[in-house]
Each structure stands twice: as C-alpha cells, then as structure tokens.
Amino acid sequence: MPGKDNARSMRTACSVRGTIEPAMSAQDPHVRRDDLARAREIARKHSLIVTVEEAYLAGGFGSAVLELLETNGLQDKVKLVRMGVSDEIVTHGDPKLLLGHYGLNADGIRDRVKKSLESLSDVATNKNRLRAVK
C-alpha cells in the first residue's frame, strides 16, 4: 500500500540522480502489479532496479519484478534490490518514524541505491581485472 510519504521519499532520493548516476531514471512508485511491461523495458535499459514498497516484501511488487526478470531471462543481466518490510511483526506508530526505521525514507532509499551502485561498480572492476589475467 503505497503512501504519500513513500512517494515523496522516492522522489527525493531520486532527485540526487545526477550525483549518483547520470543514466538513472525514476519511475512512478504506484505501478500496478499487473503493469510489468514497463518493468521489462526498464530491465533491458538499466543494470540496477530498486523497488520500494511500504508493505511486506513477500508477494509484493518486488517479487513480481523478480519473477518477470526470471521469466524473461534477465535475472543475470540486472541487479534487483527490493526494499520493504521483512516478514516480521511490525510495531505500530508514527508512519514517518516507521519508514525511517525500515530505511524506506528518502535517506534510506538514497543510501541503499548508492551502496547498490557501488557494488555494481566493484563487480565491473573485478570482471575487468579477471579479463586482464586471462
């Protein structure tokens, strides 16, 4: 169940795209589960997909994107990072505090995207090193 705070956090985190990666694009966080054609297109254009949802990860939109990648043979071509709530009992409280606790606010999303992009960069560097050894 996407909310206004999560959508705002997503836009804020993606607004730093020029400082993270120039080719990054942000998509509407309110995509319907059955609207996966756009996700397939995104997977073919980008090396990283990050899904963010304010609900449990199991059976959520990120899971549907994961299935789509596997079905289309794209699971080895793109890294998928699913952000959401793990399967645990969630305490109740102020939504902004809870989003921060689960890393689903602007800072948490931005930090996770940066880390994920850095890991992609490390993998690319290591692949180049391996090629040089051959």
Image: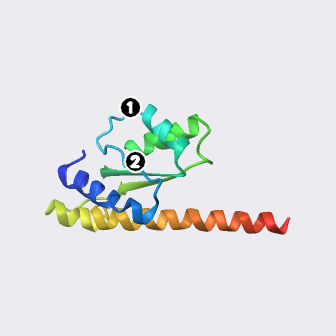
Q: Residue at x 38, y 50 (%)?
A: 57
Camera-side residue of 73 and 10: 10
Vertical relation: 130 (above or below) 63: below
Local secondary structure at mark 1: loop
Q: Nearer the viewer, mark 2 or mark 1?
A: 1
**Disc 2 residue type (three-letter):** Ala
Q: Which residue is mark 1?
A: 35
Residue found farthest to the left: 94
- Marks 2/1 in contact by CB < 8 Å: the verdict is no
Vertical relation: 39 (above or below) 102: above
Quadrant the N terminus occupies: top left
Which comes sooner in the sequence, label 2 or label 1? 1
Residue 33 screen position, x and y as percent: 36, 35
Q: Residue at x 66, y 67 (%)?
A: 125
Can the viewer see residue 59?
no
Residue 25 screen position, x and y as percent: 41, 49
Q: Residue at x 31, y 45 (%)?
A: 29
Residue found farthest to the right: 134
Left or right of 109 on screen, residue 63: right
Quadrant the C terminus occupies: bottom right
C-alpha distance separating marks 2 and 1? 18 Å
**Disc 1 residue type (three-letter):** Asp
Residue count near mark 1 (Cα–Cα under 10 Å), binned few <14, some 14–19, many ≥20: few
Residue count near mark 2 (Cα–Cα under 10 Å), binned few <14, some 14–19, many ≥20: some
Vertical relation: 73 (above or below) 46: above
Can the viewer see residue 109?
yes
Q: Which residue is mark 2?
A: 58
Local secondary structure at mark 2: loop
